Image (cartoon, rainbow, N blue to C red):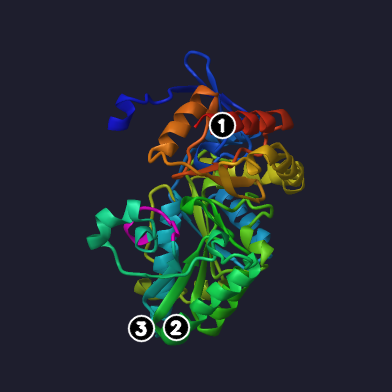
Amino acid sequence: MKHHERVPLIPIARGEGVWLYDFEGRRYLDGISSWWVNLFGHNNLRINRAISDQLGKFAHTMLAGCTHEPVIELSERLSALTGGKLGHCFYGSDGASAIEIALKMSFQYWRNCGHSGKDRYISLQNGYHGETIGALSVTDVRLFKDTYAPLLRPSEQMPTPDTRRAEPGESPRDFAFRCARSLAAWLEEHGDETAAFILEPLVQCAAGMAMYDAEYLRQARALCAQHQVHLIADEIAVGFGRTGTFFACEQAPVTPDFLCLSKGLTGGYLPLSVVLARPEIYQAFYDDDIAHGFLHSHSYTGNPLACRAALATLEIFGEDKVIESNQGKAKAMREATRAIAQHAKVKNFRQCGMICAFEVETDDPHFGEHFREQATAAELLLRPIGNTVYFMPPYVIDAAEIEVLASRTLKIIDST
């Protein structure tokens, strides 16, 4: 908060589409979807109506011994989106909660199946999975992790297939194979004591939008199956069309053992997360002995208002053919950012679906802070990660707004 003695907070009064407005009428183009959650704009009338309709019925009931129509319908629709391969849903309230659920469920699955020695976790270098204790244990971002290191359970990090780390002339696919060989060697030695491998498919967002080839997902899926290690796909940030397909895993295509979702699940309206799991995992907990069951609960698990927002979000995807529409918008983003990609100060320009990112060469140790201030003055809400600038706008952005986002960012790059 001390930072805000110099750089005031932006007091938001209302939102409309991709724009947020302060109390004096100044507007800001939400180029990062309010931390990657907003899909269909602020104050979306269809999502508003769904929440209002549910509010007229009831706002919440616990899922311990009760159920309700929105959570049943949402579970069925989410499972259908995986082709029924992930047939069971367990709800939480945010992304980190989903990660905790998946980690605990994987651990207990092996224990229930008589393999209590499988209790280690592996993740990718520079991976980010949340800031609760379990999630932070498999996160590899020192800024968040170092202070709490004494509280955390050790985990091992596998080489990241981030294409920025490839050797000159090495293709993203070849680099993915090289990183997968390191994973194979580790599992060959430690697979019998490893419960799960958790990763962010295609884009490691907190690592500066690190992007990698889908071949790594294919290799990871095969290796995990070979060594009886669960694959946990953290699609909290990259799911719901961000990478060009509804789920990022579709581009491999692979089905994980656990799929963690949040952020865009409710269109950016209400806190909700879910872990989808394979039927055989569910069966390992299906027992008369309550201690054999999965004892994990959140007060607002499967909240009806949040579930109705999620159902409205899924309806918009279907009615508006959003994935197809986004293909055109992704192309418009490529064209609008062509001058940025060719700028002398810019390197590693990359795009995956509706996510664009690049690094700005600078000697300014406070580049991100200074860039953000200039962006705010230019009516843009952007938050660089170090010297990485990225765009992840709501899907309702139009061609004119894409041009505003790109052209004003270009001017900021010229002035920094």
- Give me the C-alpha separation between circle 2 and circle 3: 10 Å
From the viewer's perspective, tell me whether residue 112 is left or right of residue 356: left
What residue appears at the point 59 percent right and 70 percent down from the top-left corner?
Answer: 176
Whether residue 52 is visible to the viewer of this picture, yes or no, is no
Q: Which mark, residue 198?
A: none
In front of the other: 149 or 194 = 149
| Callout 2 crowding tier (Cα within 10 Å): few <14, some 14–19, many ≥20 | many
Q: Which amino acid does label 2 sit on?
A: Gly
Q: What stretch is highlighted in magenta?
A: 126-134
User: In the drawing, what numbered circle is on residue 117?
Assistant: 3
Q: Mark 1 points at which residue?
A: 414
**Predominant secondary structure in magenta?**
loop
Secondary structure of residue under mark 1: helix
Q: In this view, does 3 lie to the left or right of 41?
A: left
Kindly report the distance in space between the C-alpha atoms of the residues bearing marks 3 and 1. Answer: 56 Å
- Seen from this angle, which residue lies furthest top? 24
Give, as a three-letter code, the residue at label 3: Gly
**Residue 156 quadrant:** bottom left
Label located before the other in sequence (2 or 3)? 3
Is there a contact, CB below 8 Å, between mark 3 and mark 1? Answer: no
365 part of magenta stretch = no
> Which of pointers 3 and 1 indicates the residue nearer the eye?
1
Answer with mark 3 or mark 1, whichever residue precedes in sequence. 3
Q: Which of marks 2 and 1 is nearer the N terminus?
A: 2
**Where does residue 194 sit, x and y in percent of width and height?**
41, 78
Spatial CA span between label 2 and label 1: 50 Å
Q: Which amino acid does label 1 sit on?
A: Asp
Circle 2 is placed at which residue position? 191
